Amino acid sequence: MVIAAGERARCRGGLGVNAFTCDFRVRQTAAAGQATGKLLMLMLILMLTVGIGTARANPDADFAAALAVERARLPAARFERADLLHPAPLQRILLAPDSSQLAFLHGEANARGLWLLHSNTGNTRQLLARTDATALHWSQDSQWLFIQSAEQLSVIAHDGSGARRVARFQADRQFEVLGRDPVVGDAMLVVERTRPGDTQPRSRLLRIRATGDLQALYADERLIAGALIGADGQPAFVKVVEAEQQLIVHLRRDRPANVLLRCVELQRCTLLAGDASGDASNQGVWLASDIGRDRVGLLHLGIEGGQRWTFDDPRGQADSDQIVLDPQNGQPRLVAVRSVDAELHPLDADAARHLQQIRRALPASDLDIQLGHGEAAWLIGERHSTLAVTHWHLYQPPSGVLQRILADRDGSASTPPPSRLARKLPFSWRASDGMRLHGFLSVPPGRDLRAIPLITQVHGGPWSATGPGYASTTQLLVNRGYAVFEPNFRGSTGFGREYLLAAKGDFGNGRVQQDIVEGTQAVLALGVGDPKRVGIIGASFGGYAALQGVTHSPELYRVALAAVPPADFGWALRWALTDSDLADRDGVPLATRFRLLGVDPADAALQARLSAQSPQTNAARLTRPLLLFAGGRDERVAIRSVTHYAATLRRLGRDLSVYIEPDVGHSADSPLTREAFLYLVEWMFHRHLHGEAATVPDAALAAHLHRHWRESDSAAN
């Protein structure tokens, strides 16, 4: 038996997301926690597709029908900003490989405890009153729970005994916990990476047991980016990074290692699981890959040659987002595709039968599934654009019973009910050059859609995407009477290589910005939104797009709110190479990734064009009101670039409001900072688009705003 040792979650970060390693979510049941955010995979064995979208991705009769349903709903009652600020207290919920119990973290961010729930009885008990855990990992024998934090790996027995540290992560090295060892029942697999220039091997694959014993399984001068363990307990396959390519290597005991596959130029090859079934001619490894095709699919790679594709999005639109593996034999059982609608595809008849049963109870949800082996219980996470927190269920395959669990702990009682929240409707439009593009539209129920303001909300990255799930800013805006359009312009992830690379580096006032503008115009052409009351908002690259919108398309966008925005995208790319938190990450060099994504920092002509088209260079053209929101400790977008742009606009006498919180980084984590952002969203669009007024800040928020926010002279007067 060989099973996957783990891959990172699909990313949804800012400039320079690592499109080589941060692109795929693998569910090993006991090796992956609840994902946040974020590119990816798999030809249907069984022709059963189960999806949740309210509407299909075309502005045709299906979309019109979905829009009519929203118009016919009763108007939603107003909720308050505070209702959107409660962080989900339930984190990292993880089913044991034998399904006997599940582990989870519960509590506030700085005071979370570690708990267990028994699958048969539903009883819970606390193992640790306080932990700084960032991830949990069950051992293969389900007897040990490994607790990963930023500084160490600890372990505790399933009965609460034997808590101890088994590894301290040294500051001069990098560590990645791949997941549980599938052969040695009480062990984890960890990659240790030294810094460049160290005399030790560049990477080591380690086995760390619950006793604290450490065994080096494999060393390589290249970066180890993934590994699979064989039935003999030794590494069978590794993924290594060599210069600008990734190699899938078969490690053989009696012969030299064999390179099975080379992935170059943003091609993806994510190790999933080994396949030791059948004779040698049929044995191989499962990969998530887009070798030789547009979208990432499920690929079986034979150890003696030969490739067999097993799954691809049957609608031909999207990469797959998640592969669910059997917790015992590691074989792929289910595939999720989430870029347009959230759909779940079974890969065998048994999985199809159980999925049908689950769908009878949860017909319109995005399901995050952790499988049990055979007849053992499954853990089901229920997600939807109208669910502020995930609802968790246990499914019993023998009986078909689905039971909600931890409802008193998941925080749902503190969030608006689904009936008051907006559904995201998949929407697509045809760009002026003929390319079909995708996005989402959310509208307030029971309103005259032609008479309401429209907000275009642009995602960051730019190599990221907006998905079909819950989004708090979208919900606030819709609740306040706005329609919200969220475009996945070309260059967005999750729709295949052609979609990703179609931007061709044109991130100035060019093709990508034109996609956003034309998408907004397509929404208006549907009769959604008042053309005289259109605003634009975004963070990071989305903030940059908002600046471009009000600078170069003032006839369309009447107001903008830009959070942590690079005012000159080309300059921001160059700064990121040396000064951002992305600069020293392992893997293919950041400059190489930028070049492959079409924004080569060394291309003088490209950089000159981006600069010439930037909001900074064209500051004098800005005639619309603007609010800038930024953090003084931003590690992704230089704060000095934001303040320089603000100073330029001040000198020009533009209608500019500025919020800068000195101790905040690229992401706003504190509830007070997040409420300040939501308040300013309400305030800005109410003032300039005549939407609903913001609820008056309480004393704490008013004082916070007074410290960090400066209204424009025209706004103050």
Image (spheres, grey):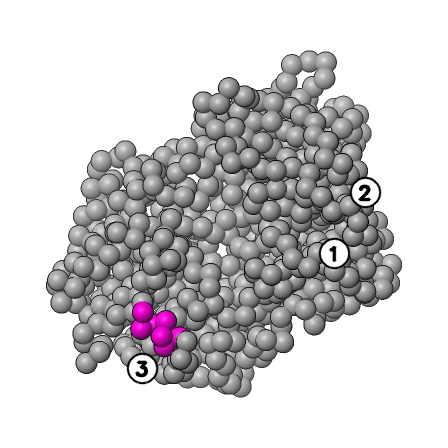
* Amino acid at pointer 1: Leu
Q: 387 above or below 646?
A: below
The mark nearer the N terminus, 3 or 1, is 1
Left or right: 591 in relation to 50: left
Q: Give the camera-side residue of 688 and 268.
A: 688
Residue 382 position, x and y percent, is 66, 64
The mark nearer the N terminus, 2 or 3, is 2
Mark 2–mark 1 distance (CA, rounded to whole Å): 18 Å
Residue 133 position, x and y percent, is 62, 51
Q: Main secondary structure of the magenta part?
A: helix
Q: 159 above or below 238?
A: below
Task: Please tell me the numbered disc located at residue 141.
Answer: 2
How crowded pointer 2 is (Cα within 10 Å; few <14, some 14-19, many 20+) is rated as some
Going by the picture, which residue comes out furthest to the top? 255
**Are circles 2 and 1 on residues that touch, CB within 8 Å?**
no
How crowded pointer 1 is (Cα within 10 Å; few <14, some 14-19, many 20+) is rated as some
Please, what secondary structure does the residue beneath circle 2 have? loop
* Amino acid at pointer 2: Asp
The mark nearer the N terminus, 2 or 1, is 1
Look at mark 3 in the image and give the residue it sits on: 690
Residue 509 position, x and y percent, is 25, 53
Q: 235 above or below 188?
A: above
Mark 2–mark 3 distance (CA, rounded to whole Å): 60 Å
Residue 270 falls in which quadrant of the image? top right
Range of magenta residues: 701-707
Look at mark 1 in the image and give the residue it sits on: 127
